[in-house]
Each structure stands twice: as C-alpha cells, then as structure tokens.
Image (cartoon, rainbow, N blue to C red):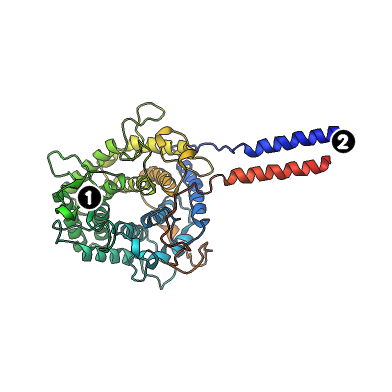
Amino acid sequence: MRSRLSATSALLASVQLLSLVPATFGQISIDLNSADSLKNAAKTVMKSMVKDYTGQQPFTAGLLPNGYGLFESGLFFNTILDYAAFTGDSSYNGLFEKDFFAQIGPNADFVPANKTEGVANDDVGYWALTAMTAAEYGAKPADSSSPAYLDLAKNVFNAFVSRWDTANCKGGLRWTIYNFQNGYDFKDTNSNGIFFELAARLGAQTGNKTYFDWATKVFDWTAKTGLTDVEANPGTGVVYAGASVQDNCKDLDKTFYSAQHANYLLGCAVMFNATGSQTWLDRAILLTSYASVTYFGPQMYVDDGTSQVVIEQACEFEDKCNNDQKAGKSVLFRSLAGAMRLNKKGEIANSLTVQLNNSAKAAGKSCQDNGNCGFKWSDLKYDPTKGTGFGEKMAAIESWMAIVRRANANPDTAVFQADTSNQPSTTSGSPSGSSSTPGATQTSSTPNSGSKVMAGSALGVMAAISFLNMLL
C-alpha cells in the first residue's frame, strides 16, 4: 500500500500543478495575399465575439454588456454585416435580424425605451449607419412587418434635421438629445460627422438632392466652426472633438479620435463619388493624409522595422483608452475601406496601403487563435493584462475585411437574400426589455477569458481521478 499511496500522492500533486498552468494559444496567422487566410482569421474572432455577446448575463437582445455604450452595440451589428458581405458566411444573419430590430425603439429611430435616459445623437447615429449598410448591401427584413433598413436610416436623418440647432453656434447637432442629459451643451464631431456621412450615403442611395444639401450644410458648419481644417491652403486635415454652446463654440476641444475623423473622411469620399466634385476629393485626400500619419503613428513598427500600425493617438500611449475609445479603430478601418472602394483612381489608397497591410498583420499577432484580441497592436503580441473586449475584436475583423475589400470591392449581396426568419435566435425576453440592472455600470472584464483554461483543467482533473481510481 505504501508504494501505491506514494504514487497516488505524487499524481495528485501533479494534477494540482497542471490545474494552475494557464492554457496557451497561438497567434492568428495572416497571409495578406490569401483572401481565405483573412476570412478564416475573421471567422475565428467573430465566433468568439458572438459567443461573448450571446453568453452575457443578464442578457438584453441587441445590447452589449454593461460597460459598453449604446453606440458600440450598433457597431457590433455593422461588423456582422461587413463580415457576412465580404466572407460570404451568413451564419450570424439570423441573429442580426432578430436582435437588431429589438432596439429600434417605439418610433423606429433607435431611441429604445430602455435607454432613453442615456441616449445621445452619436448612439442613434451609429445604429442608423448600420441600417444604411444593410440597405446598401441589399438586405431586407425577413419579417415583412419590420420597417425597411433604408427607412430606419431616413428616420434618424429626419430626427437629426429636427435637432439641428441654429440658435447656438449657428448650427450643429448637440451631443445628447435631451436638455436634462450631461453633454447637452456640447456640439461634437462624432454626432455631426455621423450626420454628414449619413446624409451623403442617403443621397448616394436615393439620388435625392436634399440629402446632399444637408451633407454640405453639416460639413460647412464643421469647417466654419473650426472643428475641421480642410479649407486652408494647405489645411492640416485634423478633426477636433467639439465645442461648447456656453461660449458659442469659440473655445474648441482639440482632442482628436479616429472614429470622428473616419466619419468625415468616408462622407467626403461618398460626396466625391456621387458628385464628381474635385473639392470633395481634395478634402477626402487631405483627411486621409492626416489619418495616415496620426492614426498610424510613425513610432509603431512591425517586422521590417519601418512600417506603421494603427494607434488611437489620444489615449493609447498611456494605456488610458476606455471601451468607447477602443471601438474607434473598427470605425476607422471600415471607413477607409469604404473610401478606397469609392475612389477608383486610387489617390486615397496610395497613402494607406502599407499602413493597412501592416495593421492587419499586427492584428493577427495581437489576437489568439481562440479569438481573443488585444488593443495595442504595436506590441505584436496578445497582452492578457489589458483584457479583450468587443472593440478590440471588431477592430481586428474590420482590419482584415479592409484588405479583402481592397482586392474584391463588391460585397456579396447574395448572402443577404436568404430567408432568415426560421433561423434560430439566441435572444430571450421581450424586445427592448431592460436588463435586471438598468442603468448599472460595470467595468468591462475579459469576456470568456479563461473558459478554455478552466475546461482544459477540468478535463485533466477528471482524467487523473479516473486513473487514481484504477490505482486504488
């Protein structure tokens, strides 16, 4: 018995040690010359991201977990659309259909009943841009009683027109919608940039000149207020965060983020493609040039020691980016890819090819083959101490789709034609139902991080116990 017990004790000790060893995952291999490689990488991360979404507790259809803004939920659904359109994988179209409509609100303008107290113009704007994407990809609701995607986008446009405030700063949208909300005194380039982009895309989709007129009006207001510098000779191409109505928008908040920049860039590209105006092309090129040196910093290197990688300039160096800011890279990649598609002669792509290529490679190095992704891609490795969230995963997927879109600019619209009404939904509860902790804030943790570690450890322990039983 002594020898058998000694062996048993030794094995138990080994099991305990094994249970403490974290599972290791490899990086995602990226071949920029292989569309299949890029699509497979996106498939890996998309599967992980959707699992994070459907596995959250408590669950509210159409919303990301507490700790994420309403606009990020809209971005999540836009990423699903881009993924389907450029991989041909319709696996998540049914989920999109059911959960997206859960948050359109009673007036079909993306002001959901469970988020009224915290909703802002940029929140509803990003949902409207997602509806616009669905319309451009030819998607139609499987439920004939649901409003058309284009109509949803139009509803938000009309709401923006009604909120255009000429009494203060001679125009512009306020950040928030209601006067009791924080930020109501602030006119931001996120909301106004979305308004500009939405108007431009609606004009391109419908041919209605009114939309183009409003796009011009919003852009001109932004430039005259000094929130973007594209009119000087030469202008810098910067887009600042916004200004307060308290001083009639004189003192600018000169913070700058990739998302607000991206909306103006894509809007200009859409306007050029629709009108042929050299002015809009010049603006798009200037905004692209600024992005190429600001949001793909020269101090960021990949394998060859010289190539640039995407960075959220205002917060990433000091590791201060929050969840909202971490979502910006996905908007940037999506907008750049869209702008390049519309710019047939390549003036926009010419200044971005290296940055996009190397950012896509860096994303692969910063993601694991279990689908978790880091935020600071210039590290060229996954950093588990910084967590892995929805913004990081959306950015990685959009970076790879940007390369696919460059090689094959046309979306696979056929992938949206299938009847999704009978596809299983992971949603539960009533549409727009509030979670059990309405209004609660929660620090974002690492979604599903360690799940494979725990599963692996549990399997190892069970196997060891079975072996122990045989010994005993």
Image quarter of the C terminus: top right
Furthest residue in direction right, as rendered: 1
Q: Residue at x 42, y 33 (%)?
A: 379
Image check: 400 left or right of 193?
Answer: right
Badge 1 is on which residue? 242
Position of residue 222 measured from the top left corner of the image (x, y, whole percent):
18, 51
Task: State whether residue 198 is above or below residue 431.
Answer: above
Give the CA separation, mark 2 to mark 1: 78 Å
Expressed as whole percent of the image width and height from the top left, the position of residue 458 reads: 66, 45
Residue at which label 2 appears: 1
Q: Earlier in the sequence, mark 2 or mark 1?
A: 2
At which x and y percent is residue 202? 27, 60
Look at the image and tell me in which quarter the N terminus lies: top right
Q: Is residue 107 left or right of residue 170?
A: right
Q: Secondary structure at mark 2?
A: loop
Task: Rate crowding at label 1 as few (under 14), some (14 to 19) or many (20 or more) other CA atoms within 10 Å.
Answer: many
Q: Nearer the viewer, residue 405 or 95?
A: 95
Corner quadrant of residue 171: bottom left
Determine if residue 434 is in view: yes
